[in-house]
Image (spheres, rainbow, N blue to C red):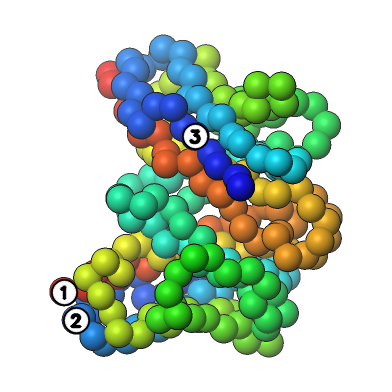
Amino acid sequence: KAGVTQTPRYLIKTRGQQVTLSCSPISGHRSVSWYQQTPGQGLQFLFEYFSETQRNKGNFPGRFSGRQFSNSRSEMNVSTLELGDSALYLCASSLGQPGRSSYEQYFGPGTRLTVT
Amino acid sequence: AQSVTQLDSQVPVFEEAPVELRCNYSSSVSVYLFWYVQYPNQGLQLLLKYLSGSTLVESINGFEAEFNKSQTSFHLRKPSVHISDTAEYFCAVSLARDRGSTLGRLYFGRGTQLTVWP
């Protein structure tokens, strides 16, 4: 079974621009979560989507948004980029339904975003 | 509030030596526990999980972790490490609720860089 895929793998943007990152979950997984990883703050939760609905949200400004499509693929968007948005953005998928196995999350390789 | 503490940011060891990476958590509700490993320029790979049952869990590559509820710990151990185990290891917890609202959120520690020297 194919794993979680993220595109693009690397991205360089300029301050003030916007960016869209894409994530395709494992087949059959309906939940997609996004995390930001930086050396200073570590791994921080951005948001989670399940069945096209945002189910949970971390403490990030409104410039960070996301959505999920009917095929469970997800995108996250960051508008008005700041230098501090430079990070590795990780997507994780899980079954998303009640049951202990839903707590297992599987991560993609990440998108490395550099803001100059 | 939930928090995860990994007591050591860096652990250097020699090949074939034993290693223990420590993880403590704080939570007012029951949790599920995970260890993830991250190799350079890669995402996180699920190494071990504790969801229920035996408090000692093992991975296919020789790592084990034991859930200690009284000490709120989930330390990771390996009796003999290899150079290929060099990576960053993250401990994480998820709130053990059946309601859907929290299923998707993991709380991570700051990570422990394990470096294995020949």
Residue A26 image point, x, y percent = 63, 67
Say which of B111 and B71 sits in front.
B71
| Helix, strand or loop under label 1 | loop
**Residue under label 2:** A14
| Helix, strand or loop under label 3 | strand
Reply above or below: A94 against A76. above
Residue A58 image point, x, y percent = 53, 65
**Chain under disc 3:** B
What label sits on residue B92 in the rendered view?
none
**Chain under disc 1:** A
**Residue under label 3:** B5
Q: Note whether residue A70 is visible.
A: yes
**Residue under label 1:** A116
Nearer to us of marks 1 and 3 is 3
Query: Residue at the spot x=43%, y=74% of the render?
Result: A61
Query: Residue at the spot x=67%, y=83% of the render?
Result: A52
Query: Residue at the spot x=65%, y=27% of the render?
Result: B72
Q: Are the residues tagged 2 and 1 within 8 Å (C-beta)?
A: yes
